[in-house]
Amino acid sequence: MIPSYAQHQRLIGARHTDSVTNTVAVGLRLIGALDVDALGRAVSELLSRHEALRMVFPTNDSVELHAHRIPLWTFDVEDPERALEFLAGNASRPFDLANGPLFRVTLVRVEPRLHLLGLELDHQITDGWSNRVLVNDLLRVYAAFAADERPPPLPESMSFASFIRSERERDHDRHVRYWRKQLAGISLVPESGLRDRAGSPGAGSVSVTTDAAPVVGFARSQGVSVVPVITGAVQAVTWKRRSERSSDVAIMSWLANRIAPMVDDTVGYFATRTVLRTDLGGDPGFVEVVDRAAKTLWGALRHQRVPHALLLRRLEPSRYGAVYRGEIPFLELNVSQDFELCRIPGLLVERVSVPVVQAPAGGLKITAGVDGGSLWLRLVYREELFSRAWCEAFLADVREYLEAGVRDPAVCLARPG
């Protein structure tokens, strides 16, 4: 087997068996009577159901499937905060890409009826959408084993290996022409233009929240999701704060790249980076900023069939893999799409954030989403490039512009009050 385009670029740019920046950690809080034996059997069953969990990468150009045994590691930690820190520490243990396995599961018992479950995977085999598929399948299989029943069959879907073959065989020329025109004059890894003082190597994070209802309500009134609303606000504040004063702004983001229903239930690394380039010339009001951001996003979604990694190989090969090497300062935005967990009889299952802070290669990475009544924004930064004070001020500007814009859609960035 060969890796997908996205997998290959990650291997070229970030193949370090001792690196934790490629680890994805998913946390669950389990409240109620837990059948630990059934959970262990469910974890083992996942490997036969999802081939991506059996993948290893002996070289940058090859993929093998190994029949690993994945035990359920169990520990007792009585304090809930310490239990989360324990999961974070476990998630910091690196994976060995060449030998695997690239998936492990840790269960921490806090009380007899309270457990924390951590799923850790190398990013080479998963993405945000796949995490949702994997978690819900684990819960369904667990429920079946706990009831002494056979697990339900997986929905009919395309295997990840078949997706890789189709990706390699596809004609990408039309989409490449779109991106060549859309990004004419700028790099496929665009520098943010944001600057601060130099500091010591490390990673830090800052967060802000605001009331979600006005933002969600504004998005609905415009016929869009919150994604272009948040994207437009981040792009506008980036434009305001950067040293360069051209009329457009380009940031990095992510697309699911699930281009057919047959891969909706497949686990694998489908997601592709993209460049969101929006013209903010003419001092537009907030509603116009959001409209322009929405059109940019729509164009990217329509042309996500060609992965960013392949665009780099064709149009800018000198920067192939550069997004992982920390050579270029860029801003990355990822607006999380929350997912519903399937219900388990007698067990309450909740998502929980595992507090792992990983230094973003580009220097700045913003994640955002809606959780209940709050809209949250989190900025992770490289401390050798940006100070905590600068990052707090940047996020404060984004929140202020969002709040002002949904109150008065005509408000311009030059006068955000």
Image: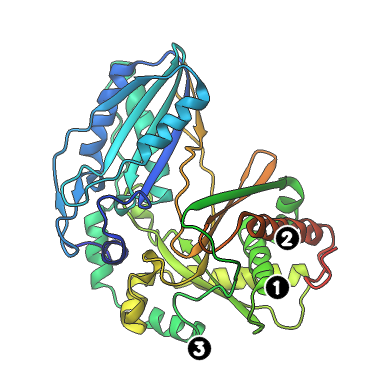
Disc 1 to disc 3, C-alpha distance: 21 Å
Amino acid type, label 1: Lys
Rendered location of residue 9, percent (x, y): 30, 67
Rendered location of residue 157, percent (x, y): 30, 49
Q: Mark 3–mark 2 contact, CB under 8 Å?
A: no
Q: Mark 2–mark 1 contact, CB under 8 Å?
A: yes
The reply, left or right, for residue 180 in relation to residue 227 is left
> In which quadrant of the rendered view does residue 230 lie?
bottom right
Mark 2 vs mark 1: which is more N-terminal?
Answer: 1
Residue named by callout 2: 397
Residue named by callout 3: 185
Amino acid type, label 2: Asp
Amino acid type, label 3: Gly
Name the element at disc 2. helix
Badge 1: how crowded within 10 Å, few (<14), some, or many (20+)? some
Rendered location of residue 97, percent (x, y): 22, 51
Query: Quadrant of the image for the N terminus?
Result: bottom left
In this picture, is 132 found above or below 71?
Answer: below
Query: Quadrant of the image for the C terminus?
Result: bottom right
Which disc is residue 240 wearing?
1
